[in-house]
Structures are given as C-alpha cells and as structure tokens.
Image: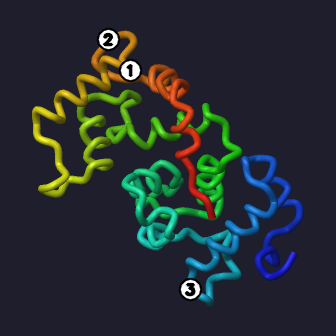
Amino acid sequence: MGAAGSQLSKELLSEYQELTFLTKQEILLAYKKFGELLPKEERSRVLSVRIPKAKILTLPELKANPFQHRICHVFSTSEYQDDSMSFEDFLDMLSVFSDSATPEVKSHYAFRIFDFDEDGALDTHDLEKLVNCLTGEAEGTKLSESEMNQLIQNILEESDIDKDGTINLSEFQHVISRSPDFVSSFKIVL
C-alpha cells in the first residue's frame, strides 16, 4: 500500500469504503492529506488525533470557499464545539463533497451548511447570511438593504412552497432537484 496506507489496515480501508462514497484510492489520499496537516511527530497517530479548524482551513480546497467555517462546523463531531476534525470527520466531509455522493445527501448537507442558526429552516436571517457569504460584505460588493430584501423575497417566492416564510429541507431539496448544476458544483476534489 505504500507509506500513505501504512497505518490504515485493509479491514479499516474496506470499512471506510463501505461507509462513504469514496474509492480506496481516495481514502488513501485523504489519509495522506490529513496526515500532512499534522506535525511530523504526530503523523503516526492520524486515526487518533483531531486537527484544529484553523489547520483544516489551510487546505486549498476549503481556503477559498465562502462557507468554510460552516463546513467545518457541520462535519465536526468535536464535543468541545471547537470545530476540530478527526480523520473520520474529514472522510465524511470528503465523501459528501465527492462526485459519487447522491443528490439527496449533497442537498441535505448543503441545507445544514446554509442553516446558520441550526433551527431546521432557512429563514430571512439565514438567507441574508448565505447571500453575504456569496457576494461578500465589503463596501463594493455588499447588497443594499432594499436589494437584499428583494432578493430574499424572490428566493422565498420561488422556494417556500407552504408559504410559511421559511424554507424547510424538503422545499430546499425540491428546488435543488430542479438545478442539476448545484450537485455538480457542490464538491471538493483532492
């Protein structure tokens, strides 16, 4: 298997392959990439350490993503709420963002990432944060209050099927199902 797989048993590799949308080669590459984020003296402990969010965000695949902090938060299983990641958290993230993940899985996690207040619905506050992440909040890129309100109303008119003023997961998935470009753009490639 080479150096990248030296600490990853065949059994564990097979288990990860069964539990994710990743190939064995992708899992080995993820193992190597995760290990490279660790100090040299800890690289033999890839399966037992957590990497701080700040270090995860140095990955080129996340560095430019406007939702990088939310992505780390959603995939982290840290009991300390510090958004650090274990190797298995990292694999889960890569699995969801892989080309092989189903549209349902991708849209479920996209919804969680966009649900900033984690209340199970995208309300005007979540949508405003989402738009600001995409457009930026600098003076030259930030939408005016009236532009923001109009955009949010347009989004709700298009997506809020039950007209309750929020977008729930099934409404979000319905909208996403009509947008095949979303699934192909919702990925991270190692």
Tag 1 residue? 159
- Tag nearer the camera, 3 or 2: 2
**Is 144 above or below relative to 27?**
above
Tag 3 residue? 39
Tell me the residue at 65%/57% (across/down).
Answer: 91
Residue type at mark 1 is: Ser
Comparing 181 with 95, the one in front is: 181
Where in the figure is residue 185, as x and y percent of width and height? Answer: 53, 46
* Residue 54 left/right relative to 75: left
Tell me the residue at 81%/47% (across/down).
Answer: 18
SS for callout 1: helix
Q: CA distance from mark 1 to mark 3?
A: 46 Å
Residue type at mark 3 is: Pro
Where in the figure is residue 152, as x and y percent of width and height? Answer: 25, 29
Residue type at mark 2 is: Lys
- For marks 1 and 3, the one nearer the N-term is 3
The quarter of the displayed image where residue 63 is located: bottom left
Give residue 130's mark.
none
Comparing 141 with 29, the one in front is: 141
Tag 2 residue? 163
**Is 53 above or below relative to 21?**
below
**Is 7 above or below relative to 151?**
below
- For marks 3 and 2, the one nearer the N-term is 3
* Residue 16 left/right relative to 173: right
Tell me the residue at 18%/27% (across/down).
Answer: 150
Tell me the residue at 65%/50% (across/down).
Answer: 98
Quarter of the image containing the C terminus? bottom right
**Is 188 above or below relative to 39?**
above
Q: Residues within 10 Å of mark 1 (few under 14, many from 20)?
A: many
SS for callout 3: loop
Q: CA distance from mark 3 to mark 2?
A: 52 Å
